[in-house]
Image (tube, coloured by chain):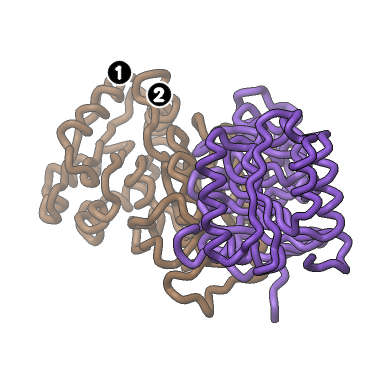
Chain colours: A purple, B brown
Amino acid sequence: MPVATETRGQLVIIGGAEDKQGDCKILREFVRCSGGLQAQIVVMTVATNLPGEVGSDYIDVFKRLGVEDVRVIDTARREDASEAKALEAITNATGVFFTGGDQSRITSVLKGTELDAALHKRYAEGIVVGGTSAGASMMSETMIVDGDAETHPRMDIVEIDSGMSFMPDALIDQHFAQRGRLGRLISGVAKEPQLLGIGIDENTAIIVDNHQFSVIGAGAVTIVDLSEVTHTNLDSLLKDEGLAVCGAKLHILPDGYRFDMQTRQPIVNP
Amino acid sequence: MPVATETRGQLVIIGGAEDKQGDCKILREFVRCSGGLQAQIVVMTVATNLPGEVGSDYIDVFKRLGVEDVRVIDTARREDASEAKALEAITNATGVFFTGGDQSRITSVLKGTELDAALHKRYAEGIVVGGTSAGASMMSETMIVDGDAETHPRMDIVEIDSGMSFMPDALIDQHFAQRGRLGRLISGVAKEPQLLGIGIDENTAIIVDNHQFSVIGAGAVTIVDLSEVTHTNLDSLLKDEGLAVCGAKLHILPDGYRFDMQTRQPIVNP
């Protein structure tokens, strides 16, 4: 197990469409964090309605990177999440990877099950939990379930709900720049302004280690901090009216940059 | 002439795709600022390669709003911009409206011509200059000529050049939320960080009166202020690398909000 002396493991949170054909920079890092060639990886296909196809793609790429012990667990129904085989796989895993699909399938099938408990226990013991697209959204305590893209912020364009709670204090969005989701992320954070909005581009990821994360990949991570806004119109806003946000803080961090969730500041080397 | 006691006129800067069929809120306001039913409006079709069609659309909507004196001036070539008929139209106009198309056509045809001088003279005397899409981009001293959308900020995704200089201190982008242009606007402002980045959504406009503007329309205006960033990687950035921006300020202002360009703050009524 990596980082066994830490209080919990690492998260690899990917904005979707990560490279699986080329140098696989992000998935390579997921494998390295999970123990390298000795990693025991479980691919969770619960989010997708094409579990066979999607699972097989990840088996292929992880095998190509040299991982021998990689298996797919597909929990299509809630009862699957208490099956001995699935629980055993999670108990032995050093890295668990959630594919894309629909994030509300992940929470509706897994939340509160034995598998959920096993996963959080293992995460507390130091394993790596990774996820892409829907598998990224579900990482936070509050998640974006669905929403409109390419529009200004409005309260009725985004739906939020409980996530799988691996990363508190954050609201994560994915395919961020590619789908023009600034308005959607800000609308979500406006509902819970104590959360930090984290928009992750495609083929880009954050690697979270306790309260810090680093950025890796081809795009950037956009961080929206509404904790010090000087004015919003939230109190008087009707459903279809535009949200006003004055004095938000914005950070855009490409590959190699680090961020501290506690200080809410990028970590810039002098 | 409206606002004759001011040192200069008003600007109506529209993010494209303004309503021309329904209540025409924005074009209605352009007409009102230009003198209402007594307005003398010139539609400049220099940006478009469909001047007949586009010009006729604006004639129709301005006539429907009750303006009797509305005409199209199409300066397809630079020599057209010193023709007596065009200069006379500008000299008599109370409102000049630039259609969409390609903003570099506006500057390459008009900049430095007699018509350019006449337009700035009339603007200084108090007339209204309006523009949509390409006609919005050209308003600033430095303008975005072209750029990629739906990507993170990079220096090679945006091309900037001199604009028509009606609004100093700003860099304007249009179709903002609809085309996911946050990365493009930030890339542009990063090249000239003293400028304020103003992203205007479709069917949304700012009405500029000296150093203040108000927002009108269905979307929002996104303001990016890089004047107090705590860190960027601009000094060491290679052409295709991701731009880092730490500590940018972000305001999102819907219909009814006002902003002061001098203080760089939204004007919020208590």
Report x, y in % for residue B261.
57, 53
Q: What residue type is labelled 2?
A: Cys
**Is A148 left or right of A5, judged from the image as shown?**
left
Q: In the rendered image, which residue does mark 1 sit on?
A: B64
| Image quadrant in which the N terminus of chain A is located | bottom right
Q: Residue at x 72, y 70 (%)?
A: A267
Relative to A187, does residue B265 appear above or below in the rendering?
below
Relative to B249, does residue A173 appear above or below in the rendering?
above
**Is B4 left or right of B232, judged from the image as shown?**
left
Query: Which residue is at the front of the view, B266 or A185?
Result: A185
Q: Residue at x 65, y 34 (%)?
A: A145
> Which quarter of the picture shows residue B61?
top left
Secondary structure of the residue carrying tag 1 is helix
Secondary structure of the residue carrying tag 2 is loop
Query: Which residue is at the front of the view, B248 or B76?
Result: B248
At label 2, counting other C-alpha atoms closer than 10 Å, the crowd grade (few under 14, some 14-19, many 20 or more) is some
Q: In the rendered image, which residue does mark 2 sit on?
A: B24
Q: Are marks 2 and 1 on the same chain?
A: yes
**Is A136 left or right of B70, judged from the image as shown?**
right
Q: Residue A208 carries which label?
A: none
> Which quarter of the picture shows residue A245?
top right
Parent chain of label 1: B
Disc 2 vs disc 1: Cβ atoms closer than 8 Å?
Answer: yes
Q: Which amino acid does label 1 sit on?
A: Arg
The image shows a total of numbered marks equal to: 2
Asked whether the viewer can see residue B6, the reply is: no
Going from the N terminus, do you reach mark 2 or mark 1 first? 2
Query: Which residue is at the front of the view, A29 or B154?
Result: A29
Can you tell which of label 2 and label 1 is closer to the viewer? 2
| Image quadrant in which the C terminus of chain A is located | bottom right
